[in-house]
């Protein structure tokens, strides 16, 4: 069973930074894409950043230039560096992975990010 474990969330003031981490229980070789999604209260879950096995990266327009997704294959960890945080970035952030053979999608339990003064 694939497990994704997020960490790094917290409370930060507007303009601040956080780095989220997601540790995978299996090698990245199993997945065709990995990414971060978020869900704010009363809103649908949305893709924030996604990286494919080929290294193609996509961001939602609202975070371009502020957030950076990266991965460390040796540590089976995907990161989301979030800078210049805004109150509208407040949400639960989820790690996500897509299985290259079965097309199954795996999710972590999420980590809360709150941007408030």
Image (spheres, helix red, strand yellow):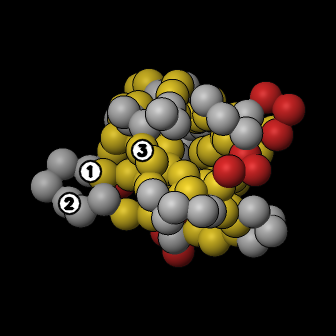
Cα separation, mark 1 vs mark 3, equals: 16 Å
Cα separation, mark 2 vs mark 1, equals: 5 Å
Which is more toward the observer, 53 or 17? Answer: 53
Mark 2 lies on a secondary structure that is loop
In the rendered image, the quadrant that contains the C terminus is top left
Q: Residues within 10 Å of mark 3 (few under 14, many from 20)?
A: some
Give how far across and how far down residue 40 sits, in percent. Answer: 26, 50
Mark 3 lies on a secondary structure that is strand
Q: Which residue is mark 3?
A: 107
Give how far across and how far down residue 67 sits, in percent. Answer: 63, 54
Q: Which mark is residue 43?
A: 2
Give how far across and how far down residue 93 sits, in percent. Answer: 42, 43
Question: Can you see residue 41?
Answer: yes
Q: Is residue 86 above or below residue 117?
A: below
- Residue at image point 86% right, 32% down: 74
Which is more toward the observer, 111 or 63? Answer: 111
Task: Please say if the residues under marks 2 and 1 sit with CB atoms less than 8 Å apart.
Answer: yes
40 horizontally vs 66: left or right: left
Q: Which residue is mark 1?
A: 40
- Residue at image point 62% right, 62% down: 100
The residue positioned farthest toward the left in the image shown: 42
Question: Can you see residue 18?
Answer: no
Q: Is residue 105 above or below residue 75?
A: below
- Residue at image point 49% right, 50% down: 96
The residue positioned farthest toward the right in the image shown: 74
Q: Which mark is residue 48?
A: none
Q: Is residue 43 above or below residue 25?
A: below
Q: Is residue 19 above or below residue 60?
A: above
Cα separation, mark 3 vs mark 2, equals: 18 Å
């Amino acid at each position: 069973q694939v497990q994704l474990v997020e960490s790094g969330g917290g409370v930060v003031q507007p303009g601040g930074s956080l780095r989220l981490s997601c540790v995978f229980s299996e090698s990245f070789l199993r997945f065709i894409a990995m990414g971060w999604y978020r869900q704010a209260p009363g809103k649908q879950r949305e893709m924030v950043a996604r990286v494919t096995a080929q290294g193609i990266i996509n961001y939602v327009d609202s975070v371009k230039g502020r957030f950076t997704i990266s991965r460390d294959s040796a540590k089976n960890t995907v990161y989301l560096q979030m800078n210049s945080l805004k109150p509208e970035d407040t949400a639960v952030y989820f790690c996500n992975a897509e299985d290259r053979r079965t097309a199954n999608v795996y999710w972590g339990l999420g980590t809360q990010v709150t941007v408030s003064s």
